Amino acid sequence: MNNFTFYSPTEFVFGKDVESKTGELCLKYGAKRVMIVYGGGSAERSGLLGRIRASLAGSGIEYCELGGVHPNPLDTKVREGITLAKEYNPDMILPVGGGSTIDTAKAIAVGYHYEGDFWDFYIGKAKPVKALPVGVVLTIPAAGSEGSGNTVITNVETKVKAGLRQPMILRPKFAVMNPELTLTLPEWQTASGISDMMAHILERYLSNTPGVQIGDRLAEGMLLAIMETAETLMANPDDYDARANIMWCGTIAHNDTCSLGRQEDWNSHAMEHEISAMYDVTHGAGLAVIFPAFLKYASSKNPGKVAQLAHRVLGIADSGDASADAYAGAEALKKWFHDVLHMPVTFAQLGIPNPNLDEMNMRLHRLKGEVLGGYMQLDAAATMEIYKLAM
Ligand code: NZQ
Ligand code: ZN
């Protein structure tokens, strides 16, 4: 196991009606003037925003609002938010929504303190040293941004979707998580969220670091729990306990609990980000297309961890041939995404029958370098082979 530092200061407040504590929590973390950020209207329609405004007002907290965050959030909305924040001078940003809203809030939080263009942070031109505090009201279990130190934004002009990882300043101060808020999710979003959280675990599981049994077993346990619970939830979307388990899994899948002390991969995410940057698809659905293809490729190049996954999680008996078992595991995962989550598992099913793979692959390597490192070394020919396996 490698050395690590784990800083996870987020207070998670979980369960029914907990959104009524939002005002109290803002005060606890020193906020008296808050900027609410939300998406395309689901939080307004469900009445949640009304309850959040009432909770803030009840605690004597002033607020301004920025709505209209787009899924696969855009730099243009971040810029609008930074301008508003510089006028209003909030002492906390409060996203009410999912990963897109939270990531926009985090981008505003770092951009507020910076004289230059916030995008510099996302392309490695500058490193943020401080951020406004962020408190979260989560409405969809998926991206895990409520517990992560990450934010992912798409630049409209360059069509680059890029991430910033700064756990020391970007992990939220608190996250309000009421599973009942997820009852209004369309099946597509519930399922895409489940696919995304599974991918977050798998990106960490695919590691060459030896001696990391705790991370492996946590990851396997979480994957098994997610798969079991997802089967219940897809059959009965109103099951509170299933909603609750999935919501908490989404957080621990991505707050680094199962990746401490080990090399991580993240190349499936990098490959998917190019798909959503070019075709604006739902992130979790893009991952359901890419991940099985990635595992298939790995089955011939570095099958060890994939075979272990196949044996311990995906119900494949140990045949003594790691490569064959890894391939069978990749097929089993693809079938599960398709049969249980009703996710697309090919580009065509994702609504892109003729993807421009050359452009996608060129953009991937322009952003990430000639060779993507991690579980495998992937040059342009390798990533193209993976994209083709997803056709
Ligand atoms: O915008 P509104 O109207 O709120 O509707 C949203 C949106 O259309 C809807 N929704 C959310 N909660 C709802 C609801 N509809 C009904 N009832 C509710 N309770 O769901 C749609 C998707 O929302 P979004 O915030 O985009 O979902 P998600 O949490 O999946 O976030 C995806 C984004 O997060 C990034 C992805 O790349 C993508 O841009 N990621 C962020 C990460 C991070 N910061 O750590 C890690 C992830 O790997 C991921 O890359
Ligand atoms: Zn993800």
Image (tube, rainbow, N blue to C red):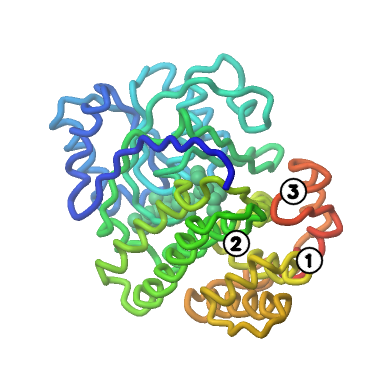
Q: Residues within 10 Å of mark 3 (few under 14, many from 20)?
A: some
From the image, tell me which residue sits under label 2. 287
Q: Nearer the viewer, mark 2 or mark 1?
A: 1
Which mark sits nearer the N-terminus, 2 or 3? Answer: 2
Amino acid on which disc 1 is placed: Lys
Q: Compute the Cα span from label 3 to label 1.
A: 14 Å
Q: Nearer the viewer, residue 323 or 237?
A: 323
Amino acid on which disc 2 is placed: Leu
241 relative position to 168: left or right: left
Q: Identify the residue at the far right of this view.
A: 381
Q: Compute the Cα span from label 2 to label 3.
A: 19 Å
123 relative position to 144: left or right: right
Classify mark 2 as within 8 Å of ligand 2 or not, answering yes or no. yes
Query: Which secondary structure lies at badge 3?
Result: loop
From the image, tell me which residue sits under label 1. 301
Quadrant location, the C terminus: bottom right
From the image, tell me which residue sits under label 3. 373
Q: Compute the Cα span from label 2 to label 1.
A: 20 Å
